Image: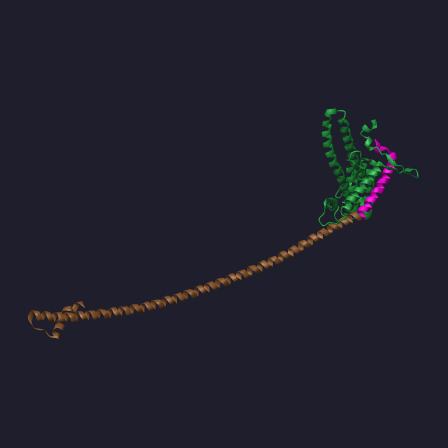
Amino acid sequence: MPQFDIATFPSQIIWLAISFVVLYILMARVALPRIGNVLAERQDKIDDNLASAEEMRATAQADAEAYDKSLALARSDARAAIQETAREVSSDAQAKSEQLGQRLAAQIKTAEAEIERAKTAARASIRDAAVGVAQAATQRLIGTTPSEQATAAAVDRALGGRS
Amino acid sequence: MAEAHNPLEQFHIKPLIPIHIGGIDASFTNSAAFMVVAVLCISALMILSVRSRALVPGRWQLLAELSYTFIAKMLTDTIGKEGRPYFPFIFSVFMFVLFGNMLGMLPYSFTYTSHLAVTFALAAFIFVAVTLIAIAKHGMKFFSFFLPHGVPIAMAPLLIPIEIISYLSRPVSLSVRLFANMMAGHTLLKVVAGFVIPLGIFGAIPVLGLVAVTALELLIAFLQAYIFTILTCIYINDAVHLH
């Protein structure tokens, strides 16, 4: 087997040492620090961005809270205004309906008084007519005209209970 | 050409540029060439792709970043914060083994991780370094590592040799596991491929097998790099924290 040809060992080991030392120096001095820097920079950038994102989120949340607060305030203001207006409107309406009721009651009262007056007037004119009719009838039946007072008394007696 | 059909031919080390320094053969071979290619590929991936330092990474930069975070996570999961100084080394080990395995999957390429000399040299270096770190961190207390906590003292004569043997066999198991996996997989590929042409029309059957074995080998190439690296992490963890 070529692996056990001891004559090749020195050259293999010498070149292994040379190439490995070169590789080690390149890696330790150049490649690894550079990659480490790139990774660290990226991590920093990510951390920075996360921090600023967190900040923005906090600001946004504060804004949202302020918005909610002002919205709630506006809403309660509006509700108060609506209640105020409703109360005003209803009291106004009540006052108006009371006025109307009073006016109507007054009108009813005048109308009733009018009716009463008309009734008495009518009743009086009926009595006068009855007295006249009674006088004329008596004249025709017995030829004498009864006195105004006597006829009126008789008519009143006759109408007595029905006025 | 008869030799080309030998499944072990692919593991032959051929000098490309013969170099001899003081009687030692330091020739630039095909193995060395692929090590250099691996270093170039890793450097291109890890350095060029991150040149733009894009905030949102492109594909190559993402690949580089994923390798970085993959190894960084492995390191912190097994060792914790104390593992940080070893990150460049662990990362280099992982990439060097992974690219060695993966480049070996290309046809006509050479797999330097399929050679015991390479894997053992890496494992032996790791073993020695880990032992030195442990002694530097814990001094003489390091040797208490060979007697697990809460073991009756009567068991010590039996347990201590076992622990020492298991400790000393770490570089062997670490290097042989990688080398044997790589060599066996590539030999199997070559053997199966050897059946395709002689079987004529029925060569389609080994081709299907080749496809399956290639997929398996890709998985093993990654898996063995991962195992090699995580075992290194575990050894360093033992050195840093003892028990």
| Quarter of the view holding residue A86 | bottom left
Q: Residue at x 13, y 69 (%)?
A: A133
Chief secondary structure of the magenta portion: helix
Chain in brown in the render:
A
Give the number of callouts: 0
Q: Which colour scheme appears in the figure?
A: by chain
Q: Is residue A131 above or below residue B213?
A: below
Q: Residue at x 65, y 55 (%)?
A: A53
| Quarter of the view holding residue B215 | top right
* Residue with the most extreme left position: A142
Q: Could you tell me which quadrant the C terminus of chain A lies in?
A: bottom left
User: Which residue range is magenta in the image?
Assistant: A1-29
Q: Could you tell me which quadrant the N terminus of chain A lies in?
A: top right
Q: Residue at x 75, y 27 (%)?
A: B196
Q: Residue at x 82, y 36 (%)?
A: B116
Chain in green in the render:
B
In percent of width and height, residue B199 lies at 75, 24
In percent of width and height, residue A59 lies at 62, 58
In percent of width and height, residue B139 lies at 82, 47
